Amino acid sequence: MTDTAEFPPDDDRGPEPGPAGWLSAEDIAAVRAQLPLVYVDAIPVHVDESGDVVEVGLLLRATPLGTMTRALVTGRVLYHERVRDALLRHIEKDLGPVALPQVPASPQPFTVAEYFPTPGITPFHDPRQHAISLAYVVPVNGDCRPQQNALDLAWLTPEEACSDTVQAEMVNGQGTLVRQAMAHVGRLD
Amino acid sequence: MTDTAEFPPDDDRGPEPGPAGWLSAEDIAAVRAQLPLVYVDAIPVHVDESGDVVEVGLLLRATPLGTMTRALVTGRVLYHERVRDALLRHIEKDLGPVALPQVPASPQPFTVAEYFPTPGITPFHDPRQHAISLAYVVPVNGDCRPQQNALDLAWLTPEEACSDTVQAEMVNGQGTLVRQAMAHVGRLD
Amino acid sequence: MTDTAEFPPDDDRGPEPGPAGWLSAEDIAAVRAQLPLVYVDAIPVHVDESGDVVEVGLLLRATPLGTMTRALVTGRVLYHERVRDALLRHIEKDLGPVALPQVPASPQPFTVAEYFPTPGITPFHDPRQHAISLAYVVPVNGDCRPQQNALDLAWLTPEEACSDTVQAEMVNGQGTLVRQAMAHVGRLD
Amino acid sequence: MTDTAEFPPDDDRGPEPGPAGWLSAEDIAAVRAQLPLVYVDAIPVHVDESGDVVEVGLLLRATPLGTMTRALVTGRVLYHERVRDALLRHIEKDLGPVALPQVPASPQPFTVAEYFPTPGITPFHDPRQHAISLAYVVPVNGDCRPQQNALDLAWLTPEEACSDTVQAEMVNGQGTLVRQAMAHVGRLD
C-alpha cells in the first residue's frame, strides 16, 4: 500500500468519514482491526503497437523524513463500487484526469496481493491493516500528471523497474508486485 | 452467497462475535452497510487423470419455506487469514474434514464475483451486503460429506450443472458463476 | 477456425507458399496430417470507459452454398512471428488497418481452444487440421471495416452474441468460444 | 526447451518417425524451418495442505561436455493429442509413472513461452526451432524418479530455484520461466 502511516491522510486511509450513521473514528479503528479490506493495485504501463510493455509508471513520494519512495497506484474499493470503477477512480486520482487508462475487460486480476499487518506471512505488508488487493496491469495512453502527494511520475523500462536500485526504493512489497506484473506480461528477465 | 437471510445463522454471516473489543451487533450492521466484505467462492469438482473436469459438486439446501436450492461453497475471509486458508476452511466446513481439496497453487482467481445488495449491477446479488468474492475451481479427491445446514452434496456433470433445470435451482447468480467456472475449464458447451 | 474448406483460399489456410526450399503442396498436406498448428483467435470487443465489454464484433461470411455464418478473427502464427504480432496482423487483415486494437499486454490467453479434425473430443472442430489456438479478448477503438471475404462486421451486445440465434450462426465451436470469452469478462448471463 | 541439440535424440526432438506416409528426415528439417511447433512446459511443484508451493522440482542433466544443467519438464504436443494429455505424458516420461501429477483443470496456461531460434526476441531461445510453449505449474504428490537422460531430480525451495546460482544452471530461458512461475504462485520474493 502506498498510503502508509507517514503520509498525510487521504481517501485511501480507511472507511470514509460520512453522514450520520457512518462509523465513528473509533469504530473505524475497530473495523480495521477485525476485517480485511478490499483494495486494488494498478501497475500503469506504456505499451507499443503490439501490446508489449515498454515502460512502467512509478509514483515518487517523499516521506516526512525526506526519504524518497516509489509507489504504485493503489486504493480501497468503496461500498457499492465495482472493482473496475475503483481502478479507474484511483488511476485518475493519482495520474490525473486525462491518463486515458485501458481498464482490463476481465475482472480476473493477475494476482491477489495480501498485505498483512504482520510482516513475513506474504511478501506484502501494511502496518495499518489487513488489505486484500486485486492487482491489474493497466496500459495508459494519455498524458499523466501526478496528483496529490506525489512529487513525480517516472516511466522506467521493465528492466529498470526490476533493478535492485529501484526495488530498494519501494516499500511494503510493492517491488515484488512490480516484478510479478512484469513476469505476467513476459518482461521479467 | 449461499448463506442468505433465510438460512440459520452460521459463521459466514458477518463479522464474528468475539471477545471484548470486537464489534457489537449494531456495529456489524453498520460495517455491512459501509464496506465491501471479502469472500471466497469454491466450485468443487472431480477431475480425471488428465485434469479434465468430470463432475461438479453442488450443495443442496432447504429454505425455511421448504424450497430446495443448490449452492457453492462460499464464505468470508477473516482478519489475518490468507485467502488460501479461507478456501480450505470453508471447503472443510461444507464438505467435511476428509474432502482432500487441492487448493490452487496460484492466488489468481478465475474470476471476481461482485455481489451487490442492489440487483442488476452485476450478475451477482447479495441482499445483505456488498461482497467481493474471489472464485476458484477446486478439485477434491476425498470423501465429501455435507456438513451443517446442507442436506446433500450432489455430483453433476458439467452439462447437468449448466442445464436450465439446475441453473433455476441456484440463487443470487451462483448459477452464472458455475457456468463461468465451466467456461474456464473448457467444459461449457 | 473461420477459414473452413468452403471459403476461398487465403493466407490462413496452411504453410505459406514460398521461395525455393519451402514445402510443396503435397508436403503441406502431409504436415497438416501430422502436426498440430498454432493459431490465435481474437474476440474483438468494444468497451466503455471502465473497461466493461458492451459489444462483440462478429464477421459475417457467406458460404458457397449461400448460407451466412458469423466468425471470429482467427489465423495461423507464422514461423518466427510473435503471438502478439500474429494477433495484430490477423486483426488488421480482417478488420482493416485503422481498427486500433489493444493487443493484451500479457501473453496469457483466456483459454486455449483445441480444434480437432475429429468432432467431439473438445467443443472445437476443424475438418482440415489439428489447430491449437490461443484465444484473447481484444478491445478495438478505431474504425473497423471488414476486409477480404467478409461481407460485414456486426457489433452485438454480449447477450445477443450468446443468444441461441447468433450461436446457431457460428460453426466449429466458435459460438462456444464467444461464450467462454463473455464468461471471462463477466458478461455471461 | 530441455532437449537441446547436445542431448541424445528422444521423442521430443521433432515430428515422430512413423509408418509410410509420415514425413522423412529431410521433410522434418524443412518443417522445423517453416512452422512454429507446439510445446508444453511443466513446472513440477510440491505444495502444502493450503496449496502453497514449498518446493520446485528441477531435472539435472549432463551435457556431452560434462556440464550440469537444470531443466523443466518439456516436450511437444503430438498430432491429435490434447494439451492436458501431452502434459501428463511428458511428466510421466520425465518423472516416472507414479509421480501422480495434478494436471490443471483449466487449459489457461500461466504464460506462453515463445522459444525463438534467434536469441533476444523473447527471453526464450531454442537453437533448433521456433517453439510456442504453453506453461503450467503442476503439483505432484507421488514418488518421482527421473527417467531417461536425467541424472537426478532435485527439489528446491522457491527461493533456491530463483537464486543466481540455480538460475545460472538453467539454459534457453528456463530460469526465467521458473521465476515467472514463482511470480504466478506468489512465491517470487
Image (cartoon, coloured by chain):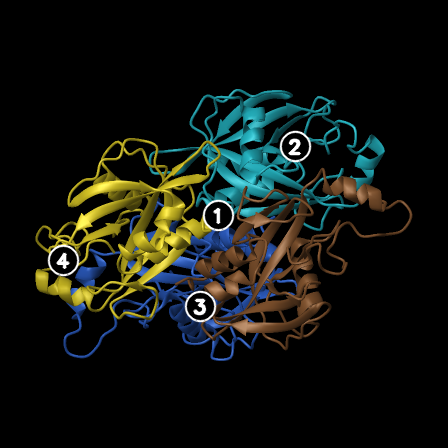
Chain colours: A cyan, B brown, C yellow, D blue
Q: Quadrant of residue C140?
A: top left
Where in the figure is residue B132, as x and y percent of width and height?
62, 47
> Position of C144 compared to D156: left or right?
left
Q: Amino acid at mark 1?
A: Gly
> Position of B74 compared to D146: left or right?
right
Query: Distance of mark 3 from mark 4, alpha carbons?
Result: 31 Å
Please, which chain is the residue tagged with disc 4 on? C
> Position of B23 compared to A188: left or right?
right
Please, which chain is the residue tagged with disc 3 on? B
Q: Quadrant of residue B151?
A: bottom right
Mark closer to the observer (3, 4): 3
Circle 3: element type: helix
Residue A75 visible: yes
Disc number placed over residue B159 in the picture, else none: 3
Residue pictured at 31% horizontal, 33% vertical:
C100
- Asked if D180 appears above or below D20 in the picture, the reply is above
Disc number placed over residue C6 in the picture, else none: 4
Where in the figure is residue B64, as x and y percent of width and height?
71, 63
